[in-house]
Amino acid sequence: MTVLHARQRAALEQAAGWFGLLQCEEASVADQAGWQAWLERDEYNRWAWAQVEQLQQRLHDMPTNVTGRALRLAEQPALGSRRSILKGFAMMVGTGALGYTTYRQGQRAGWMADYHTRTGERLDTVLADGSRLQLNTDSAVDVLYSATQRRIQLHKGELLLNSAVDPARRPLLVQTAQGSIQALGTRFAVRAEADSTLVSVFEHQVRINPSGAAPLVLDAGTQCRFSANQLGAVQQVNAGQDAWSQGMLVANDQRLDAFVAELSRYRPGWLRCDPAVGGLRISGAFATDDSDQTLRALSTALPVRVVQTTRYWVTVVAL
């Protein structure tokens, strides 16, 4: 079996995502431009896309019992088009090491999750038990309900959950790479970060259960970041921390570099803040759906200017 290093695997994950997106009818001109920018950004991206193209060419040489199912998935209507096409892609190449690796990495990245959002998107839905689930930008979850428990697997990104009372009294858990969070009749947010999970409670309580540390009950108005083996300090929830669920990004005397980093989550491409102006402070409420307007507001409120090399390469610098 071919052994791929981390950068190749990451590029293949992204290539599979772009493949699924560009095959969908709802793919826009902006999506195509985003793909082009991604392709030109890195030699590994170009290598990964070449693998996709080669695998598409090989489709005609593969047995019908393999390709037929993949093509039927790709022809499904838009209701689940991205997820279906990605599954079809995985099945088309599933007989080889590369295809299997892409399929498994795609599962972990969340492209085939039950619910997912792209960069800049939000999702608001009611689950089978009546719980309200909201997803922030670039997020993915699987909903796994059984006769004994309700479990939501957060693969990436951020969710806000209003838990419903379950007549069967099944526990409601949010699972991340570092552990689980059990709802205790509550409204709370969970954010998956690189090596930790951030939990913020807005109503009632939750129980944090790290994989390798003692549990902690977290009260309303507080938050805690935890890793698999350690709980961080309990802190107060920031005002407006859940405003993203209403399409707003709230800053309360926040450092500019931290604000720009948060804004970058809602915008495709590369957005960064020059360290020379990173310590400036910003306050206000900004729409996440229009990051261009937010960037213009920064240049009005602060002694900074926004340099756009391309639509997808933007830097906030000093005047």
Image (spheres, rainbow, N blue to C red):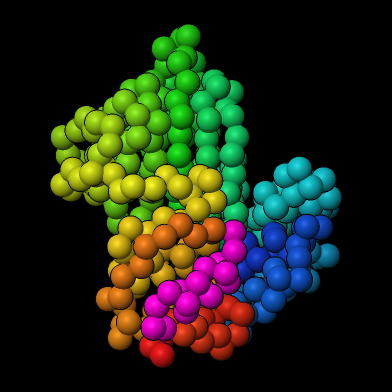
Q: Position of residue 253 (x, y in %)?
A: 30, 62
- Residue sitting at 16 percent across and 35 percent down? 214
The magenta segment is 289-304
Viewer-side residue, 260 vs 88: 260
- Between 217 and 69, which is closer to the camera in this rendering? 217
Taking the view exactly as shown, the residue that stands out farthest to the front is 301
Looking at the picture, does residue 268 appear above or below residue 245? Answer: below
Task: Look at the image and say whether residue 302 sits in the magenta stretch.
Answer: yes
Residue in view at x 46 percent, y 52 percent: 157
In this view, 120 is above or below 183: below
- Whether the magenta-drawn stretch holds residue 223 is answered as no
* 167 on left or right of 56: left
Is residue 95 visible in the rendered image? The answer is: no
Percent across and percent down for residue 232 are 18, 48
Give the image quarter of residue 57.
bottom right
Q: Residue at x 59, y 59 (%)?
A: 289
Tell me residue 41's x, y (percent): 55, 83
Looking at the image, can residue 206 be seen?
yes
Q: Percent x, y for residue 299?
A: 47, 79
- Dominant secondary structure (helix, strand or loop) of the stretch shown in magenta: helix
Whether 251 is drawn above or below 31: the answer is above
